[in-house]
Image (spheres, rainbow, N blue to C red):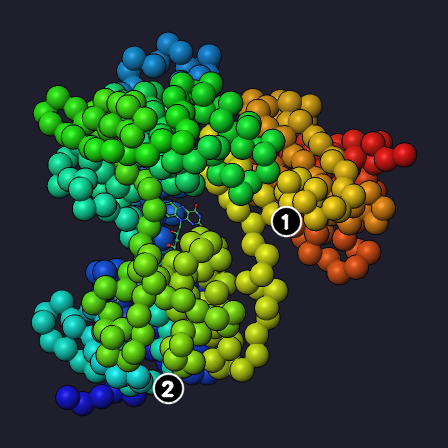
Amino acid sequence: MAVKTVDSIVIGTGPAGEGAAMKLAKAGQRVAVVEAHTQVGGGCTHWGTIPSKALRHNIQMLADYRRNPLFQHTLEQVVIEFPDLLRAADSVITEQVRTRYRFYQRNRVEVLFGRARLVGPHEVEVLRPDGVAERLGASHIVIATGSRPYRPPDVDFDHPRVRDSDTLLRLTHTPRSITIYGAGVIGCEYASIMASLGTKVNLVDTRDRLLSYLDDEITDALSYHLRQQGVVIRHDEAYAAVAADDDGVVLSCKSGKRFKTDVLLWANGRTGNTQGLGLEAVGLAPNGRGQLDVNQSYQTTLPHVYAVGDVAGPPALASAGYDQGRFVGAHIAEGQCDWSLVKTFPTGIYTVPEISSVGRTERELTAALVPYEVANAQFKHIARAQITGHTVGMLKLLFHRETLEILGIHCFGQQASEIVHIGQAIMAQPGSANTLLYFAQTTFNYPTMAEAYRVAALNGLNRLF
Ligand SMILES: Cc1cc2nc3c(=O)[nH]c(=O)nc-3n(C[C@H](O)[C@H](O)[C@H](O)COP(=O)(O)OP(=O)(O)OC[C@H]3O[C@@H](n4cnc5c(N)ncnc54)[C@H](O)[C@@H]3O)c2cc1C
């Protein structure tokens, strides 16, 4: 079979693959990307980040409308179901695909649709949808094949009441009740999405607190507000069995507790997309989670074969994956890269209320014996929040008592994932330029949510003695 040669092959067009392909193309390399789905964009665009965030936005608009006293007399005329809200998300996906495909075209990156398989250390076979196979050769290969929901073999995912985060997007009705097993980011996000829609939600957590890597005060607030929305949260549970029939689906736990609802969303773990990738042909093997282990430069045990994004393991975020791709692109094309690109990344969790943070938590700082102080602003005291009616939330800055260096930023409430970036920009400054004083001495537009930084800074400085 004839082999077409390029400089680098990227497998997968999610954020990680796109980041790598764009960086390589900009560096002057001849790049081919291979995509098994019918369109570019990855799981991120088609069944992960984009549909879930567009769905959340639509549901939130609906919830705001239902809450607004101005529109109470119109409520009965408006009947909106889950599939209507999903359809509204479709237009965003279409626009994202168009935009991303244009990026590949403009940068002269060849996009091949088909399933890629390694057939040699420098060779990839692409099986096109029409059954024709073609071969590509390159000096470097970037694997960016993403991940999929983990499905335990004893749970019947063929039953229409049993869903994972991919198949939930094919629900054709609004469930009256849902049990979500697994309270990681996806589980918590869907718990608040479904609760906002008026669905009764059980959130069954396998751990003793929600999202334990976040600051305790923030996760306490999340638990409180989820409960306020009617979500029943159960911690430290482990499933024993799932049984679905025409009447409902029952999740039985080892503790003896049972949850019966219309639908079960299984949101407990993900596995890397390495099956059928021909890893064995080149002497690579996935770990127990189907992921490829990599070194700090995202190289597998074969130095010319890289793995980025979800397939390379945590943090499994679109945001981090894109930068890992860019990092690897620079590593291949220029032999040098910006380590800071992949070291510190923020978390954005689109629950209601939204959560975002960057830097260290109180628990981490206490364990490291760092003398920190806390600077707080409650959204209910911020004029912009009062105007928009989104007064639930807070901004919390952790700073060094002596140097005033900002060490951590933790926020929950409307627009938290945007608000955190203001502080992140200051926190990223070198040396004494990273200071809480910036927020006390800078004029912010008024009314804005950015004002929370000034309020927090003054609050924090007042605590010092
Ligand atoms: C419900 C949900 C919500 C999320 N929300 C957020 C969020 O708000 N923010 C955030 O940062 N992250 C979020 N994520 C995570 C984010 O979607 C992933 O981290 C991101 O998509 C990973 O990017 P990737 O490029 O590694 O893989 P993907 O986006 O999964 O793309 C991988 C691509 O590789 C292709 N592929 C696989 N195998 C082959 C093969 N053999 N040959 C050719 N192509 C192949 C697949 O078809 C796919 O298109 C969410 C995930 C889910 C499931």
Task: Report, in whole angstroms, how far the alpha carbon at label 1 lies from the one at label 2.
Answer: 37 Å
Q: Is residue 3 left or right of residue 431?
A: left
Looking at the image, how many numbered discs can be counted on the residues? 2
Residue type (three-letter) at the residue carrying disc 2: Ser
Left or right of 322 in this view: 451: right
Residue at the disc numbered 1: 359
Q: Residue at x 20, y 32 (%)?
A: 242
Instruction: Name the residue located 21 percent from the left edge and 26 percent from the top edge.
Output: 250
Quadrant placement of the C terminus: top right
Quarter of the picture holding the N terminus: bottom left
Q: What is the x, y in percent for residue 289?
A: 33, 57
Instruction: Give percent across and percent down for residue 52.
Output: 36, 41
Closer to viewer: mark 1 or mark 2: 1
Residue 139's disc is 2
Amino acid under disc 1:
Gly
Q: Is residue 22 above or below residue 428?
A: below
Residue placed furthest toward the right: 465
**Secondary structure beneath label 1:** strand
Q: Position of residue 282 (x, y in %)?
A: 28, 80
50 or 234, nearer to the observer:
234
Mark 1 nearby-residue class (10 Å; few <14, some 14–19, many ≥20): some
